[in-house]
Amino acid sequence: MIPASFAPMILKLMMPKVTDHLMKVFKLDKVLEYVEKPNEADRIGKQNQEHITMVAGEISGLDDRLKKLEILSKNTNAK
């Protein structure tokens, strides 16, 4: 029987090997790489965000023009 005082030392020696084995078995290293490194979804998301920002600016400008046209239309109808 192993004394209880050796248990922490044994765990300290075995845990890195056990975790490495689990990472290989469940392919967690690939999952970790996918999560941490930029990938195609990140690039597409960034492009979409830039496009959305550009379109939002254009919509804002068109909204301002529409308000001016409505004001002008009311002024010409009032005469």
Image (cartoon, grey):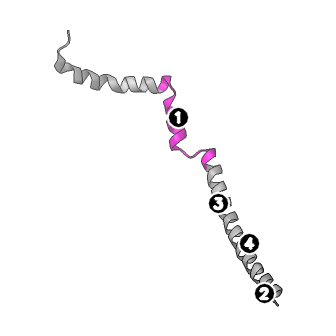
Q: Earlier in the sequence, mark 1 or mark 2?
A: 1
Give the residue at x 62% y 45%: 41
The residue to which callout 2 is attached is 75
Label 1, label 2: how far apart the Cα atoms are = 63 Å
Q: Amino acid at mark 2?
A: Asn
Q: Nearer the viewer, mark 1 or mark 3?
A: 3
The residue to which callout 4 is attached is 62
Q: Residues within 10 Å of mark 1 (few under 14, many from 20)?
A: few
Q: Nearer the viewer, mark 2 or mark 4?
A: 2
Q: Say which quarter of the image contains residue 55.
A: bottom right
Whether the residues at callouts 4 and 1 have beta carbons within 8 Å, the answer is no
42 is higher (above) or lower (below) than 25:
below
Provide the major secondary structure of the magenta segment. Answer: helix
Spot occupied by residue 29 in the image (x, y as percentages of width and height): 49, 32
Residue 17 left/right relative to 24: left
Residue 33 left/right relative to 71: left
Give the residue at x 17% y 20%: 5
Stretch in magenta: 24-42
* Image mark for residue 50: 3
The residue to which callout 1 is attached is 31
Q: Amino acid at mark 4?
A: Leu
Label 2, label 4: how far apart the Cα atoms are = 20 Å
Label 1, label 3: how far apart the Cα atoms are = 27 Å
For the residue labelled by badge 2, is the local secondary structure a helix, a strand or a loop?
Answer: helix
Magenta segment includes 29:
yes
For the residue labelled by badge 1, is the local secondary structure a helix, a strand or a loop?
Answer: helix
Could you say which is closer to the camera, residue 45 or residue 67? Answer: 67
Q: Amino acid at mark 3?
A: Glu
For the residue labelled by badge 3, is the local secondary structure a helix, a strand or a loop?
Answer: helix
